[in-house]
Amino acid sequence: MASSTRMKRRTLFAAGLGLLVAPAILRDKAEAAATGERRNMNVTHLPEINQFKLGSYKFTVVRDGINVSEKPYETYGTNQDPETVKALLAASFLPSDKLANGYAPALIDTGSDVILVDTGFGENGRPRGTGKLIEGLKAAGYSADDVTIVALTHLHGDHIGGLMENGAPAFRNARYAIGQAEYDFWSDKRREGTPAEAGHKAVLANVAPLVEKATFIKDGESVAPGITAMLAAGHSPGHMVFHVESEGKRLMVTGDTANHYVLSLLRPDWEVRFDMDKAQAAATRRKVFDMIATDKIAFLGYHMPFPAVGFIERQEGGYRFVPKTYQFDI
């Protein structure tokens, strides 16, 4: 009994020590975030994931990484006075001179298929702190080999960079669902010598090797039971969104229809530098988010604040982003 008592005391002491150490760790992390300094360079940062249920489907959202850029008004609201863009950011409690952009590939486990929507930057992004998808899937209990379908909203680099790994398919057991219009545009040799040449080369390197296992989809076609593609062009020529439904619950995976939760949603008509057809992109934003607001369904936006899922309500001629909390947990 004495030995047992000593063991209990040791366990309690260890637990108490852990409680004492935890605030110090949290403090160090907070100080590092504020100052940019790191006291312990050996700290391992776990990948950020978020899991929730939609009917019988299980979603896993992975934060592939984050980039910080300057002068947001040079990307969003390019048809506006820069001071107008800065004022909206400031009114939304956001910096007016910098912008943090995240990337959120999502896994949908239907029970019969494991469907990955978009792939992040992949190995080429890792030196810059992105390309964390595979690591995130492992943290969620999945491997790349578990993926049976890769569905792509469009073929920009931050969505297709993770398709290949060390020169081989990263998801070797998967088939692919790719928008027909999107692939036709980017794979066309006529992109050579144009501003789209870099995108053309990325598609030849990352997507073209996989076409034998690809299904090229059009508006209204099915990716898998309960998952339907809808053409939402403008950001790119064949950009797709995916409507997901399970047991009467609905969610729209909107890709890059809106790229910022304030600048793209509250002001959907403001032009965005990355939108290839700016007028069409604005019209598509209104079409898609009017549908989401009217039907009161959830959406997952690739560049929304992590975990990139929320709802929409109409406000000031645009839309207000309402992030998810515990709706999917009870």
Image (cartoon, helix red, strand yellow):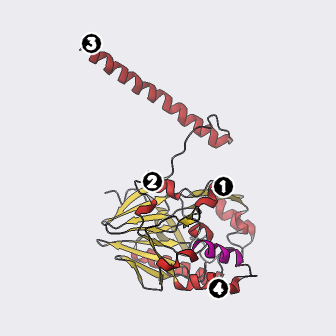
Residue displayed at 62% across by 53% down: 129
Of marks 4 and 1, the one in the foreground: 4
Q: Mark 4 is on which residue type?
A: Asp
The residue wearing badge 3 is 2
Give the number of the disc on residue 188: 4
State which region is magenta: 196-207
Kindly report the distance in space between the C-alpha atoms of the residues bearing marks 3 and 1: 55 Å
**Rendered residue at 49%/32% (across/down):** 22
In the structure shown, which secondary structural element does the residue marked by tag 1 occupy? helix
Mark positioned earlier in the residue sequence (4 or 3):
3
What residue sits right under mark 2 in the picture? 138
Residue type of the residue flagged with mark 2: Lys
Residue 128, numbered circle: 1
Work out how far the residue at label 4 is from the one at label 1, CA to CA, in angstroms: 30 Å
**Residue 77 occupies which quadrant of the picture?**
bottom right
Q: CA distance from mark 3 to mark 2?
A: 43 Å
The label on residue 41 is: none
Q: Residues within 10 Å of mark 2 (few under 14, many from 20)?
A: few
Work out how far the residue at label 2 is from the one at label 1, CA to CA, in angstroms: 20 Å
Instruction: Point out the tag, 3 or 2, that comes first from the N-terminus.
Output: 3
**As drawn, which residue projects farthest toward the top?**
2
Q: Position of residue 21 (x, y in %)?
A: 50, 29
Does residue 22 show up magenta in the picture?
no
Amino acid on which disc 3 is placed: Ala
CB within 8 Å, label 3 to label 1: no
**Residue 89 visible, this angle:** yes
Nearest to viewer (mark 2 / mark 1)? 2
* Label 3 secondary element: helix
